[in-house]
Image: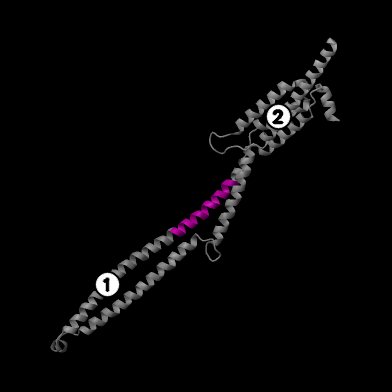
Amino acid sequence: MKKEELHQRKVKFSEATQVDYDQLKTRTIIALDKLGHQKFSSEPGGYSLENWTKGVNLLLDDFEEKMGAARLPSAYAERRRELTYWLSKPVDLSSIDNSISELMQNEEEIVRKLHEARTRSSSRIDELRTELAMRSAELEEKKRQLSSLASERRSDSIFKRLFGGNSTLSVDATEDGVEEMESRLRVLASGILEEQKSLRSIDKHSPESPWVEEWRRLESLQARRKKLENERLEKLQLVREREELTASIADMISRVSPAEKKGEGEAASSS
């Protein structure tokens, strides 16, 4: 009875150990999948590649310690060395940075043109408004003069009209001056409206805007730059490499058989 009980205990211990190994593999594979798709923070002090590297190394160290190096195929160690290589390798961003810089310069040139157009239009509106205010004041003065001349003309005696100076000429000249000023004011008001319309058109993306092509070009440049910036971030964060290598290591872990030794496991995986 004692031998049978001992044998049963060994079987139960072996089964329990096997379950622990399976759970270890499952936990590690799930964690690797999450790490392979981990997104980094763009904020200073946020989750970074350094944090990710520390996390994946702790995970694999724990797995190797609990699984036992004798049960791991040599290909596993090779994959881990490859992961370490990619994580330590400097990322060359010179080409993509040059492209982004060129796009930004082109964007700035268009933005500068739009800003200068706004400034010119706004300055012209201010000039026209200043002249309009000045001409309006002059017109009011002319109208007062005209009113005064008309009053004087009505109060003049017949004798003064016959022998005095001719006030009709002064009145006529003043009336002509008023009409000329009123015409100029209409031109100024119309000019202000046109400049305001021109100013609004600068920020319009509609087909009738004279700046529509500049806006289209600017939007195209911005879209291209945004795409390159995303590509740069992916390169900097080794997005593709991290995903592929963690998936490869996870696949290798899934093939590890806890009951097999290192040589047997390699033979089984190669077949």
- Seen at 43% across and 60% down, the residue is 120
Q: Could you tell me residue 134's position as x and y percent?
A: 30, 67
Quadrant where the N terminus is found in the figure = top right
Range of residues picked out in magenta? 99-118
**Circles 1 and 2 in contact, beta carbons < 8 Å:** no
Residue 97 figure quarter = top right
Q: Secondary structure at mark 1?
A: helix
Q: Callout 1: few (<14), some (14-19), or many (20+) C-alpha neighbours within 10 Å?
A: few
Q: Nearer the viewer, residue 248 or 208?
A: 248
- Seen at 72% across and 21% down, the residue is 66
The residue to which callout 1 is attached is: 140
The residue to which callout 2 is attached is: 27
Residue 30 figure quarter = top right
Q: Could you tell me residue 131's position as x and y percent?
A: 33, 66
- Seen at 82% across and 16% down, the residue is 8
Residue 168 figure quarter = bottom left
For residue 174, side relative to residue 67 (left or right):
left
Confirm whether the magenta stretch covers residue 112: yes
Say which label, 1 or 2, has the lower sequence index. 2
The relative height of residue 143 versus residue 115 in the rendered view (above or below) is below
